[in-house]
Amino acid sequence: MEKLEKQINFILELDKLKSIMRRSYLLNRERFEDSAEHSWHVSVLALTLAEHADDEIDLTHVLKMLLIHDVVEIDAGDTYFFDKKGNSDKTEREMKAAERIFGLLPPEQENDFRSAWEEYEEGDTKNARFANALDRFIPLLHNYYTQGKSWQEHKVRFEQVMTLKEPIEKGSKSLWEYAHSLILSAVEKGYLAK
């Protein structure tokens, strides 16, 4: 029962992810998405687009990483990709959060989940490269299909968005080609300043 209680406490803790707001708008432009919605959406993206990974991937492992990659935001908050100041101490905040949140689990699961999270963060394996590509790709879709609403509110420019190239291209050249065409179209349509 002690193991089950720890697992239940972890599950209950994850409910807090539904209260962590991101900077990507829902496609209806009514509000920002929360981190739980993002984790679900990017996981469905992985199921749908797995064939576009450059390398042979373990889809179950990719899904594990995507479902837990933002759990640390419960304590660390969501750090906007283009926020230089927020990104300066992001690693430290997230490591501390990972220790506490994954520490709620029984030791074997704590090690398993923490290892998957660290693999995602390091981005060195073929599974992590694809997971990271999807995690960078989906906010681009949100921004494009909301006519650049978040980009404009945060004064994000073309050059900044092009920094998404490396993580997307490392995991899927075809997704990068598609993303690049969206970025160029966003500039042409006035969604994104050059």
Image: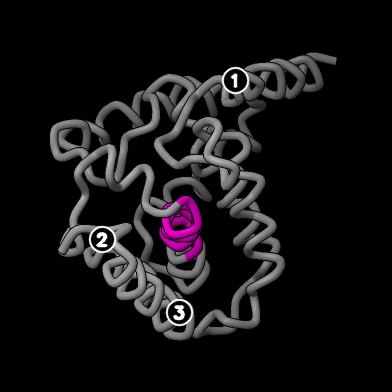
Q: Measuring 35% from the left and 31% from the top, which residue is drawn there? A: 94
**Which residue in the protein does label 2 denote?**
161
Whether residues under marks 1 and 3 lie with C-beta atoms below 8 angstroms apart, the answer is: no
Marks 1 and 3 sit apart, C-alpha to C-alpha, by: 40 Å
> Residue 70, how many percent across, how many down?
49, 38
Amino acid type, label 2: Val
User: Regarding mark 3 in the picture, which secondary structure is present there?
Assistant: helix
Q: Measuring 21% from the left and 31% from the top, which residue is drawn there? A: 86
**Residue range highlighted in magenta:** 134-146
- Answer with the quarter of the image where residue 24 lies: top left
Amino acid type, label 1: Leu
Whether residue 35 is visible here, answered yes or no, is yes
Of 156 and 69, nearer the camera is: 156
**Which residue in the protein does label 3 denote?**
178
Give the class, few, some or many, for how many residues have Cα within 10 Å of label 1's Cα (few <14, many ≥20): some
- Give the mark nearest the N terminus, 1 or 2: 1
Amino acid type, label 3: Tyr
- Answer with the quarter of the image where residue 58 lies: bottom right
Give the numbered dot on residue 104.
1
- Drawn side of residue 175 relative to residue 60, left or right: left
> Residue 36, how many percent across, how many down?
61, 34
Marks 1 and 2 sit apart, C-alpha to C-alpha, by: 36 Å
Of 130 and 139, nearer the camera is: 139
